[in-house]
């Protein structure tokens, strides 16, 4: 019977710490720190494939899926483990790259390191553009708040019910200031807001074009049948979730996005609290926003 090698990796921007466990052996057969060069890391990990089966893994983080895809292309199984599944032993009070790599290798050995869903390169690129849109909307809200607080500090209060309507904008443009610099400041803020709104409109048009692509068209059309969901939300759901069939039921999906009640029960006492808020924050916000639209 061929041996199984469990390769735990602690991946950082500059370096990757590697720890390898073999079969049922307790001690590592290799520990080392390599430069974060994907080709070199793949070569090192794949060298064990000639000796037996290889299972590699690393903790999900800002380094993305580049290493996982390179190893998968080299026919090496590589799991990207969710951070909330990696146990943290607080009593040890010691955390090093070497210990983290060994911990991940042991998780793989005991089959405790389940991988997150790895999006396709196309889904990841689409998802990044959708998140870029959310960042622009956030910048717009911040810019609006800056303008409102700036005018409030100077004593200009808009007393109508709805702000940021056409009437509100005309009111702002007609304001007079004792100091010309205040007018220049408002113009700078407002021109930045208009620029952001223009970028958002162009992004929305682009996203609708992407939603009509044959790759996404059918799945987007299904989700748009629900009230409160249109092109942008449906395309975001498709790219964030990927394969809906990996969830056996609705409860499992709700647990994945953190929309189930938290619970702390012991003995005969059951205590439930607010939602757990675990998992994909962006996806959870989309579902909550869609629910409000539905209402």
Image (cartoon, rainbow, N blue to C red):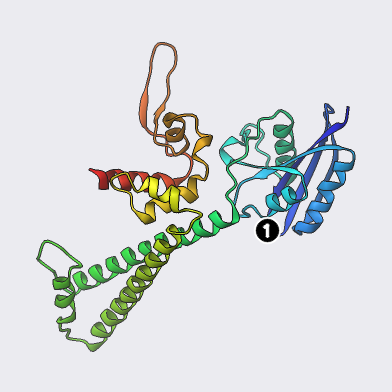
Whole-percent x, y for residue 155 in the image:
15, 73
Q: Residue at x 48, y 41 (%)?
A: 279
User: In the visual, does 198 lie left or right of 153?
Assistant: right
Q: Residue at x 39, y 45 (%)?
A: 222
Give the quadrant of the C terminus: top left
Q: Is residue 282 visible?
A: no
Give the quadrant of the N terminus: top right
Q: Residue at x 54, y 54 (%)?
A: 123
Q: Residue at x 24, y 82 (%)?
A: 182
User: In the visual, does 43 lie left or right of 138?
Assistant: right
* Residue occupying the far bottom of the picture: 180
Whole-percent x, y for residue 43 in the image:
83, 52
User: In the visual, does 185 lie left or right of 233?
Assistant: left
Name the residue carrying label 1.
13
Locate residue 143: give its quadrant.
Answer: bottom left
Q: Is residue 272 visible?
A: yes
Whole-percent x, y for residue 289 in the image:
32, 48
Q: Secondary structure at mark 1?
A: loop
Q: Foreground: 19 or 71?
A: 71
Q: Foreground: 46 or 271?
A: 46
Reply above or below: 6 against 232. Answer: above
**Label 1: few (<14), some or many (≥20) within 10 Å?**
few
Reply above or below: 39 against 295. Answer: below
């Amino acid at each position: 019977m061929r041996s199984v090698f469990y390769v735990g990796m602690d991946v950082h921007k500059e370096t990757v710490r590697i720890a390898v466990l073999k079969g049922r052996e307790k001690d590592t057969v290799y520990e080392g720190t390599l430069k974060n060069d994907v080709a070199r890391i793949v070569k090192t990990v794949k060298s064990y494939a000639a000796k037996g089966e290889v299972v590699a893994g690393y903790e999900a983080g800002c380094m993305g899926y580049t290493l996982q895809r390179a190893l998968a292309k080299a026919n090496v199984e590589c799991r990207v483990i969710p951070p909330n599944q990696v146990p943290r032993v607080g009593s040890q009070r010691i955390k090093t790259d070497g210990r983290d790599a060994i911990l991940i290798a042991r998780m793989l050995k005991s089959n405790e390191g389940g991988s997150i869903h790895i999006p396709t390169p196309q889904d990841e690129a689409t998802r990044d553009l959708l998140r870029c849109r959310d960042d622009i909307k956030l910048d717009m809200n911040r810019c609006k708040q800056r303008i409102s607080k700036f005018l409030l500090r100077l004593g200009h209060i808009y007393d109508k019910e709805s702000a940021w309507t056409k009437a509100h904008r005309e009111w702002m443009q007609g304001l007079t200031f004792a100091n010309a610099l205040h007018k220049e400041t408002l113009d700078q803020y407002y021109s930045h807001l208009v620029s952001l709104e223009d970028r958002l409109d162009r992004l929305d048009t682009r996203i609708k074009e992407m939603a009509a692509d044959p790759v996404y068209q059918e799945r987007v059309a299904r989700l748009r049948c629900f009230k409160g969901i249109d092109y942008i939300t449906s395309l975001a759901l498709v790219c964030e979730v990927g394969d809906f069939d990996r969830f056996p039921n609705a409860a499992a999906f709700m647990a994945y996005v953190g929309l189930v009640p938290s619970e702390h029960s012991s003995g005969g006492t059951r205590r439930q609290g607010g939602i757990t808020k675990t998992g994909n924050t962006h996806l959870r916000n989309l579902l909550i926003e869609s629910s409000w639209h539905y209402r």
